[in-house]
């Protein structure tokens, strides 16, 4: 559904996208992650034909974003569109109007608007002018607006930023429903829990470059850490247990005043070695947990690597 090759975008001296190769298979959700200014929005803008690439190519739904922009635009849903519609109209009237612009009959446009209003829990707000909407309501109407034309490819740039937990969950369920119906989604988010729940594959951008890409599960397994979390019976035992673990080659960490020690391990088999090391120094364990790597871990590890790397290059540069 999306295919880019060597995609590059420069704004003056800033390289917002640097040689990006991206592939998004039809019917999947791909999470696009990266620090502020990494280039996520720029990538969405290029793919949705709002910004022209400086170099490289991008095809969306089989069409070139530069030469066949109109074909691309006809097939995508994009949040932010709502900013273009009328603040004096109610949420429902705006959705009906958009439906009409997509060529639906009056009754079909009304039906679609009502479906979306229900899906986004906007029933109470539907009849009020959108100018009085709260930030979260506005965002939900924006998302509903992007779905009016039932696009097969949807760009969601931070769709749940600023939403309360119920609204966030409602948006997640909507996205899951869209994908179950065969839609493809490119999702940028700062919430790793959101990416983990929705995205089957992840691309991580840093300074405009792809620093990691692949199935979410693989990325976690490869980059994330497994840990053993040991809760000791007493906080007085923390120093003894820490020493014992260190002697056995582990690198435990814990917060000051806490009875919990966290130790990275590579296999679940090391759990036994952790317990044995603590048992040998006669420290009592109150609770023991093995934690699989999370996307948070993987993401942080990737960014740590990137910082180490950029530090190295800086050092080289100054020598
Ligand atoms: N229109 C523009 N003119 C000049 N520079 C721009 C423009 N748009 C983006 N940039 C720059 O390109 C880089 C990437 O910005 P972009 O908005 O794509 O990042 P992002 O990953 O979406 O960040 P955030 O998480 O903050 O939304 C930044 O350095 C930004 O300042
Ligand atoms: Mg952005």
Image (cartoon, rainbow, N blue to C red):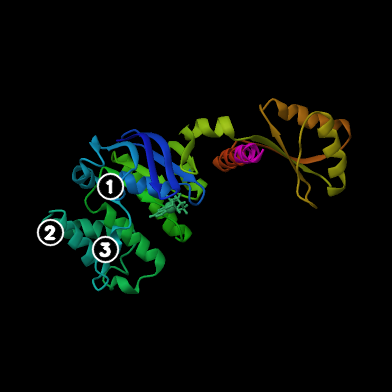
In the foreground, 32 or 152: 32
* Disc 2 target residue: 107
Q: Which residue is mark 1?
A: 49
Q: Residues within 10 Å of mark 1 (few under 14, many from 20)?
A: many
Distance from disc 1 to disc 3, alpha carbons, whole Å, reads 17 Å
Distance from Cα at disc 2 to Cα at disc 3? 23 Å
The foreground one among 316 and 177 is: 316
Q: Where in the figure is residue 65, as x and y percent of width and height? A: 26, 41
Indicate whether residue 316 is drawn in magenta.
Answer: yes
Badge 1 or badge 2: first in the primary sequence: 1
Label whose residue precedes the other's in the sequence (1 or 3): 1
Residue found at x 24% / y 68%: 86
Numbered badge on residue 84: 3
Q: Position of residue 95 (x, y in %)?
A: 23, 61
Examine the rendered structure and indicate whether residue 215 appears above or below residue 262: above
Q: Residues within 10 Å of mark 2 (few under 14, many from 20)?
A: few
Quadrant into which the C terminus falls: top right
* Mark 1 beta carbon near ligand 1 (under 8 Å): no
Q: What span is colored magenta in the figure? A: 308-319
Q: Nearer the viewer, residue 250 or 173?
A: 250
């Amino acid at each position: 559904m999306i295919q880019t090759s060597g995609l590059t975008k420069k704004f003056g001296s800033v390289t917002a996208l640097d040689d990006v190769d991206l592939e998004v298979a039809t019917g999947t959700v791909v999470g696009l992650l990266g620090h502020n200014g990494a280039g996520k929005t720029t990538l969405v803008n290029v793919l949705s034909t709002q910004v022209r690439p400086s170099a490289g190519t991008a095809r969306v739904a089989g069409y070139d974003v530069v030469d066949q922009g109109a074909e691309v635009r006809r097939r995508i849903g994009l949040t932010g569109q709502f900013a273009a519609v009328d603040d004096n109209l109610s949420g429902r009237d705006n959705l009906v109007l958009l439906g009409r612009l997509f060529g639906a009959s009056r009754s079909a446009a009304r039906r679609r608007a009502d479906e979306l209003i229900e899906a986004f829990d906007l029933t109470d707000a539907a009849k009020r002018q959108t100018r009085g909407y709260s930030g979260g309501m506005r965002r939900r109407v924006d998302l509903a607006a992007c779905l009016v034309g039932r696009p097969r490819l949807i760009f969601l740039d931070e769709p749940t930023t600023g939403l309360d937990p119920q609204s966030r969950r409602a948006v997640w369920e909507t996205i899951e429903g869209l994908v179950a119906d065969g839609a493809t989604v490119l999702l940028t988010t700062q919430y790793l829990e959101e990416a983990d729940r929705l995205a089957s594959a992840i691309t991580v951008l840093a300074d405009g470059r792809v620093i990691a890409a692949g199935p979410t599960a693989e990325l976690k397994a490869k980059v994330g850490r497994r840990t053993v979390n040991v809760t000791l019976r007493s906080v007085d035992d923390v120093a003894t247990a820490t020493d014992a673990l260190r002697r056995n080659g582990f690198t435990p960490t814990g917060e000051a005043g806490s009875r919990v020690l966290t130790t990275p391990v590579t296999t679940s088999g090391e759990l036994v070695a952790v317990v044995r090391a603590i048992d040998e120094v006669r420290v009592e364990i109150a609770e023991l947990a093995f934690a699989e790597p999370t996307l948070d871990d993987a993401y942080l590890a990737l960014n740590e690597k990137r910082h180490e790397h950029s530090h190295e290059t800086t050092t080289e540069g100054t020598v």
